[in-house]
Image (cartoon, rainbow, N blue to C red):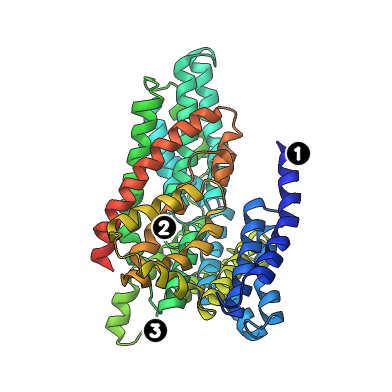
Amino acid sequence: MSNLLQKTKLLGLVVGPALFCLVYFLVSPGLLSEKSIVVLALGAWMVTWWATEAMPIPVSALLPMIVFPLLGVSTVREASAPYGDPVIFLFMGGFILALGLERHKLHQRIALSLIRLTGTSGNGIILGFMLSTALISMWISNTATAIMMLPIAASVTSLLATETGQADDPRFKKFATGLMLAIAYAASIGGMATIIGTPPNVVMVGFMKRFYNLDVSFTRWMMVGIPLMLMALASCYFIITRLLFRNHLPSIEGSRELIHRKLSDLGKLSKEEKMVLAVFSITCFFWIFRQNMNILIGKNLLDDTTIAMAGGMLMFLMPVNLKEQKFLLDWSDMKELPWGILLLFGGGLCLADGMEKSGLVQIVGNHFSQQQGINSNVLIFSLTAISMGLTELMSNVALVTIFVPVVFGVADGFHINPIWLAMPVTYAASCAFMMPISTPPNAVLFASGYIRMKDMIKTGILLNLCCLVIITILSLTLIQWLF
C-alpha cells in the first residue's frame, strides 16, 4: 500500500506541471482570455498535486502567490493579500481556543462526563461516544477529536472483551466495529455544526464574503448546522445499532467504574479548566449574539474574526500564576497550531480570486444560464451528490476550494442565491464515510483493527444516502428560509 502511495505521489509530481504546460500552451486564446488560461492551467496543476498529495498540501497552496505575479494575472500585493484574509484569522482564533481546551484536558472531561450520562449498555456506550465526539468536534479538529477518543474507546472495548469472556464473541465484534465507526463518523458530522468546526466551512464563508460581500454569521450557520448534525447523528446511530451491527449487549459490569476512574484521574475541575471554560463560553456568547449586540450598539463593530482573535488572545492573557508568569497558553504552545491549514486557506482564496478576476466563474455561469431546462431543486441535489462523491477521493478542503467558486458561477447563471448551492455542497464535502483514505478520522479509527474495509464501505454508503437526503431537504427548506 505504501509502495503504491509513493508511486502515486511521484506520478502526481510530474503530471501536475505537465498539465499546466498542456493547458497553458494548447488552449486557444480565442476561447478564453490569457489570464483565464493561466488560472485554469494552475488550477489543473494544484488539483493534481492536492489529489495525489505529491507535495504537502500547504506547499501546493503557495503556487498562486508565485505563478500569478510571474504570468501577469495579478500583482504580488494582490496575490499575497488573500493569505492574510480575515477568514484565516477567524480560524486561527478557533485553533487557539482549541489549544487551550486540549492543553488543560477540558475536552477529555466533557467527553467522559457525557459517556457516563448515556448509560453503560452496548448501545448506550455507542451513543455516549457519538454525542461527546460530535460535541467536541464542533470546536476542535475532527482528527484531534478522533485521536483523543480512540484510547478511551480502546479501554472500553478491552474491558468488554474481558467481560464477555473472549474477543471472538459475535456481540463483542459487532459492538467494537459499531463503536469505532460511530466515533469516526461523529467526528466528521460534529464539524458541520459550526463555522470553525471544519476547514471547508471556513473556506466557504470566506468565499461568500470575497465574492458577494455576504457575511454568514455564526448564529445562522448553527441554525442549519445543528439540525443537520442531530439528524445525521440519529441516522448514523440507527444504521449502526439497529441495521448493521446490532450487539444486544446489556449494561456492562465494570464500564461505569472505568469511566469513573478516568474522571477521578483528572481530579476536580482545576483552576485552569475553569478559566478555559470561561474564555470559551464568553467567546461563544459573543459569536452567537454578535448581530443582536451590533443592533443594540447601533454600529457594526463586532465581527466573528475579531471575536475569535480576542478569545484567542485571552488564552495568553489569563494568568494561572502571576508570580511565576504562567498563563493559560504561552507562545511555545503555538507550535501545535496547524499553520499549514492556514496557508491552504490562503492559497484557495488566491486561486478563487484569480478565477473571479479572470472571468472563469462568469464563463461557467453563462454556460449554465443557457441550460434553462434544469430545475433548481434538481440542481441542488445534483451538485450535493457530486460533492459527496468527490470528497471520498480527495481532501474536503481542496474540494470546497475548487468546487465552490464553480458553484457560484452556476448560481449566477441560474440567477439564484449562491448560498443555496454553496452551503449544501460544503456540507456534503464533510460526508466522507466510505473509506479509510477519505478523511483522517476514518483512518485513525480504522487503525484500531476492529473495522473491516467492507464494513466501512457498507455503512458509509447508507450514511451517505441518508445525509444526501437530509442536506437536500434542509437546502430546500431551512437554508432558503434563513438566507
Whether residue 313 is visible here, answered yes or no, is: no
Where is residue 413 shown, x and y percent of the image? 36, 71
Q: Is residue 323 left or right of residue 197?
A: right
Viewer-nearest of labels 1 and 3?
Answer: 1
Whether residues under marks 2 and 3 lie with C-beta atoms below 8 angstroms apart, the answer is no
Where is residue 328 shown, x and y percent of the image? 58, 63
Alpha carbons under labels 2 and 3: distance apart? 31 Å
- Residue at image location 51% in from the left, 76% down from the top: 86
The residue carrying mark 1 is 3
Residue nearer the viewer, 424 or 182: 424
Q: Is residue 296 left or right of residue 316?
A: left
Where is residue 379 shown, x and y percent of the image? 34, 58
The residue carrying mark 2 is 425
Callout 1 secondary element: helix
User: Label 2 sits on what residue type?
Assistant: Val
- Residue at image location 50% in from the left, 66% down from the top: 203
Callout 2 secondary element: helix
Q: Quadrant of the N terminus?
A: top right
- In the rendered structure, find residue 301 and report the number of the disc placed on it: 3
User: Label 3 sits on what residue type?
Assistant: Leu
Whether residue 386 is visible here, answered yes or no, is: yes
User: Label 1 sits on what residue type?
Assistant: Asn
Callout 3 secondary element: loop
Alpha carbons under labels 2 and 1: distance apart? 33 Å
Query: Quick one: label 2 or label 3, which is nearer the N terminus?
Result: 3
When the figure is inspected, residue 247 is found, relative to residue 309, above or below; the finding is above
Where is residue 100 shown, x and y percent of the image? 55, 59
- Residue at image location 65% in from the left, 86% down from the top: 75
Query: Quick one: label 2 or label 1, which is nearer the N terminus?
Result: 1
Asked which quadrant contains residue 217, the reply is bottom left
When the figure is inspected, residue 39 is found, relative to residue 96, above or below; the finding is below
